[in-house]
Image (cartoon, rainbow, N blue to C red):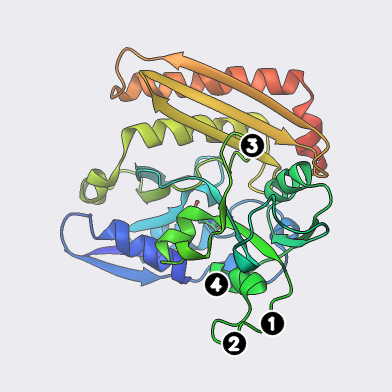
Amino acid sequence: MTLKVGTRGSALALAQTRAVAARFAGEVEIVEVTTQGDVDRTSLSQLGGTGVFVSALRDALLDGTVDVAVHSMKDLPTAPAEGIELAAVTKREDARDALCARDGLTLDALPEGARVGTGSPRRAAQLRAARPDLEVVDIRGNVPTRLARAQGDAETGEGADLDAVVLALAGLRRLGLEGAATDLLDLSRFPTAPAQGALAVEVRAGDASARAAVAKTDHVATRAAVDAERRVLAGLEAGCAAPLGARAEVEDGMLFLTASAYALDGSRRITASHAHTLDSVSDRAELAEAARDVAERAVAEMLEGGAAELVAAAR
Ligand SMILES: NCc1[nH]cc(CCC(=O)O)c1CC(=O)O
């Protein structure tokens, strides 16, 4: 039986879905599903609510149009979805954000007052914190559209109205556009969205054959890391548009987590870092417990420091 794999129709979604589906067992068919996020041109920060990219795909899964749904994991709301199980979390790509600037410029080398585009309140706050002189411009659209704002038309170079845009390196790589990156922003100064760079593979709850077909693409350490990061989002009751960065990693027998909440204007950053020592780096139950533990401690510390106020300001 052919496994029907649902995806958004954007070039990025198609590229990443094809890449992960190639590793599923048996025959697969890729099915494009249109989501509200693809249709709506409103600013992401205006759209409100979480998961605009996700619900149409989940509906297609639940009504049997597809057997598997592949999402960018950072676009998934943290609330569990009725009737759906997370069958696999793929090994994370480089999670860093990339500055894509005209003339090969780095963030430090951008001229005073340069115009930098992003639709993400987190990236906007981080940019303002690093370079208060920059003019941060709210942009939307798919990756090539956003790139064109800084690069102009692919052939003529005309029509660029920004000096740079910030995009996820993982997305650029999957599209073969990594060459557009002119500066890779380090994760300690620019922690990225929870789960950035990982893909979520969902199946209908209890569908053992679909679960088995995708099982090989599950990466235990990535699952634990993004679980910890997403627990911070949930613990602060923040949505995907919150000015919140988080980075977790399994390394040297420990699960590390660092998370930061920002004031939208970049004037404040509240950071917490915690680690949990593991007896085994491949024991799922222990990793899940470690993720819960580091996230709980980070959330408590951030709330103590006033993070609720920062996150609420972005609603
Ligand atoms: N919010 C859009 C989105 N969702 C996932 C990615 C690509 C990177 C990833 O898989 O995390 C992007 C584009 C971007 O942020 O530049």
Quadrant assignment, res 12: bottom left
Q: Which residue is mark 3?
A: 189
Which three-letter amino acid code belongs to the residue tagged 3? Arg
Q: Which residue is mark 4?
A: 144
Disc on res. 159: 1
Q: Are marks 1 and 2 in contact (CB under 8 Å)?
A: yes
Q: Gap in Å between the C-alphas at discs 1 and 4?
A: 14 Å
Between 83 and 210, the one lying in front of the other is: 210
For label 4, count other residues whose C-alpha is less than 10 Å away and answer few (under 14), some (14-19) or many (20+): some
Callout 4: helix, strand or loop? helix
For label 2, count other residues whose C-alpha is less than 10 Å away and answer few (under 14), some (14-19) or many (20+): few
For marks 4 and 3 on the same chain, the one whose residue lies earlier in the sequence = 4
Which three-letter amino acid code belongs to the residue tagged 4? Pro
Between 312 and 142, the one lying in front of the other is: 142
- Of badges 1 and 2, nearer the viewer stands 2
For image coordinates 22% across by 55% down, the residue present is 24
Callout 1: helix, strand or loop? loop
Q: Are marks 4 and 2 in contact (CB under 8 Å)?
A: no
Q: Gap in Å between the C-alphas at discs 4 and 3?
A: 26 Å
The percent position of residue 265, horizontal first and vertical second, equals: 83, 44
Disc on res. 156: 2
Q: Gap in Å between the C-alphas at discs 3 and 2?
A: 35 Å
